[in-house]
Image: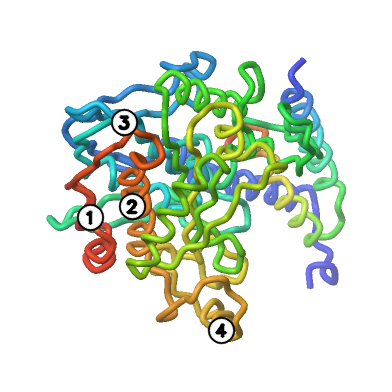
Amino acid sequence: MDLKWIYWGINVMAIVLVIRCLYREKSLREQFVAAMVLVPLILRAFFIK
Amino acid sequence: MFEKKNRASVYTATAMLVFAVVVAVISGKSYLAMRTPGPGVDRVVPHEGFIKKQLSDYFDGIKGTPADTAVYLQEGSEPGGTVLILGGTHANEPAGVIAAVVMLERAVVRRGRLIIIPFANMMARSHTFPQDAHPQTFSFETTGGNKRTFRYGSRTTNPVYEWPNPDIYIHPASGQTMAGMERSNLNRAHPGVADGGITERLAFGFMQLIKAEKVDLAVDLHEASPEYPVVEAMVAHENAMELAAMVAMELEFEGIPIRLEPSPANLHGLNHREWGDNTDVLALLLETSNPSAGRFRGKTDEALILTGADKAYQKAAGLGRLYVTYEGGNEPIAERVARHVTTVKLLADNLEYVREGKGVVIEGLPGFQELSDQGVGAFLSE
């Protein structure tokens, strides 16, 4: 299997985990940080950046 | 301030998620715009006499991939040698690209053949480096008042086309180890691999072209940071050193200072090293000084690309920290392009002296002073 798709899978898993953290966070600031972390992960998941 | 009020909830989390998606969509649109540039961006108007081919005509392993790139050939009426010019091996070195475009739009070949590839790594043109803040495009105004716009890309292939890179890249032909990202650097991928990564396949395509067209002289146009020692320089494979030395002297006579550097014998993957080792082509790489890619630079915008004027570089020049004079506190792209064009012209002019019967005569190219004074736009087609 192409290594690219293994890394893509890891990336998607990271997105799921970050969203999970986003909903579990009790601090607005930490929620904002989680949202910012999501941006590059989303871009890579769709092979945009 | 957020913690004290502690107002986080499932609703704020949802709002943040929507915010992240909106930011991703907006920035994504901007990134995608580089992959499908607007009308006229990167347009070239080859001079009469050039015929257009594709690199995939020489190696079908890149056919239909984003690596394929246009190859322009012009043959003179008299037989002679063949000169290959590459721009855009590194897409964030604009003078190399623009010098190739100026030659493509101006050159009239009287003897021999001229092959120009203005955008060697198309996959590096579709993105900029994260955190480098480079503008996506830069423009010149032509004599007729039209705008010619080109993309400012990156040093390496877009990771969208080649990902992931290893921690350590092992150069296939030599076994030399390099930083992992060099796998996506066209100028570390030569002589290429027919069934390798997309950048290695692209490099392989160039090698096939050199062999098929029996290229005598190959010149790759680059730029480097003003604080990098190999700048305003010609890097020559040992086979090309005699020719390079002749041209270096002529440049000095014309008041254009130039360094002459031998291509390191044990640094593999570079085009001049691998082309020279694997074929009988005379291979050289040219470097001009590009403050917009340097580490000292401040505000990074189109003006910096075009003028090279930067306060931090002016300070560094005053402290003697640069390998260029940085005269006038700037490094205009017109002068950088003029350097490349003049050097290529002199290399072609002198080719006959090192390869009898293989001379190449190119007319129509602007002179150093002419190009420096009138600017790049004056020598681009409308």
Look at the image and tell me whether residue B31 can be seen.
no
Q: CA distance from mark 3 to mark 1?
A: 25 Å
Q: Position of residue B374 (x, y in %)?
A: 21, 65
What crowding class fits label 1: few (fewer than 14 Cα within 10 Å), some (14-19), or many (20 or more)? many
- Which residue is the site of mark 1? B366
Q: Is residue B72 left or right of residue B208?
A: left
Q: Earlier in the sequence, mark 1 or mark 4?
A: 4
Q: CA distance from mark 2 to mark 1?
A: 8 Å
Viewer-side label of 3, 2: 3
At 20% from the left edge and 28% from the top edge, which residue is drawn? Answer: B78
Q: Are marks 3 and 4 on the same chain?
A: yes
Q: Position of residue B337 (x, y in %)?
A: 36, 57
At 63% from the left edge and 50% from the top edge, which residue is drawn? Answer: B19
What label does residue B315 carry, if any?
4
Q: CA distance from mark 3 to mark 2?
A: 23 Å
Q: Find residue B49 and report its image quarter.
A: top left
Q: Are marks 3 and 1 on the same chain?
A: yes
Look at the image and tell me whether residue B168 can be seen.
yes
Q: Is residue B276 left or right of residue B376?
A: right
Q: Mark 2: which amino acid?
A: Val
Q: Mark 4: which amino acid?
A: Lys
Of helix, strand and loop, which one carries label 1? loop
Q: With respect to residue B355, does B88 lie above or below?
A: below
- Which residue is the site of mark 2? B341
Q: Position of residue B195 (x, y in %)?
A: 64, 16
Viewer-side label of 3, 1: 3
Q: Earlier in the sequence, mark 3 or mark 1?
A: 3
Q: Earlier in the sequence, mark 3 or mark 4?
A: 4
Q: Mark 1: which amino acid?
A: Pro
Q: CA distance from mark 1 to mark 4?
A: 33 Å
Q: Earlier in the sequence, mark 2 or mark 1?
A: 2
Pick the residue in front: B266 or B13: B266
